[in-house]
Image: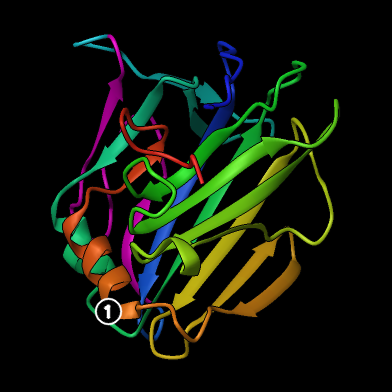
Amino acid sequence: MKQKYATPRVLMFLYVLTITSGLFAQVVNYPLEGNLNDISNNVSGTFLEWNNASPAPNYVSTPSGGQGIDLAQDQYVLLDNSFRSLISSDDSFEIEIDFRYTYTGTGNGRKPIYGSKPTGNASAGLVLVATRNSTTTFDILLGLADGNFDESSFFKVNPSPLNTNEEINISLKIDFEAKSWFFKANNVYNFGFISEGFDMTIFKNTLQNLPAYLGWQVNHGPDM
């Protein structure tokens, strides 16, 4: 049975996205200053909404003085197709995101932060999800799948709960060669290895062939 998720108007304010590949060569950098333009390799983003053919992004001011974009549960940013080859072109990649999780309702407040994965527990891909922990805190879950249900995993990566409505800086690094992941949230670190049986070739090829998105893309997501 599928879980039902609450649908708040505002769930996440995304402030900046930076992705690097290999030996920390910058792939994309979205400062989100009133637009979705990448200032590194011209990999543009497109703001979309599930049931709205022409949605308008809502850019917001941040408490620290910058700008960001407001993403409700049914809104997401689709990254340019050229992004796929950039993120999977080396032995590793790292995603760094500044955001603020704003959900204060009573449901689980689940919101994908970043993903490249269709629905289905075993479908190959990656997803990084924020989910409510308490009325004042939330957790971040990492989903990794190679198409084999027994090797798929979906687990919490932040060592301690994160504060709702606080500006959070997270970093996720996936090393294809070492079969490892590294995660940081506001300078608190976590690290682990991916299962030996996990097919990294399928996983990497999936990232190269599927669209990547920020937020919850329709027919994609974390039902793991």
The number of callouts visible is 1
**Which of 60/100 is in front?**
100
Q: Residue at x 36, y 55 (%)?
A: 29
Residue 34 in the image: state x and y as whole percent: 37, 28
**Which of 107/170 is in front?**
107
What span is colored magenta in the figure? 25-51
Q: Residue at x 14, y 56 (%)?
A: 82
**Which of 212/13 is in front?**
212
Residue 189 in the image: state x and y as whole percent: 73, 71
Q: Which residue is mark 1?
A: 201
**Which of 95/148 is in front?**
148
Residue 39 in the image: state x and y as whole percent: 28, 53
Q: Residue at x 51, y 32 (%)?
A: 67
Q: In which image quadrant can residue 41 be found? A: bottom left
SS for dot 1: helix
Q: Is residue 84 left or right of residue 139?
A: left
Q: In which image quadrant can residue 187 be found? A: bottom right
> Mark 1: few, some, or many residues within 10 Å (few <14, many ≥20)?
few
Q: Residue at x 54, y 65 (%)?
A: 172
Say what amino acid the circle numbered 1 marks.
Answer: Thr
Residue lying furthest bottom: 178
> Does the magenta-highlighted stretch encompass residue 27?
yes
Q: Is residue 208 left or right of residue 62?
A: left
Is residue 9 placed above or below 76 in the rendered structure? above
Q: In which image quadrant can residue 3 be found? A: top right
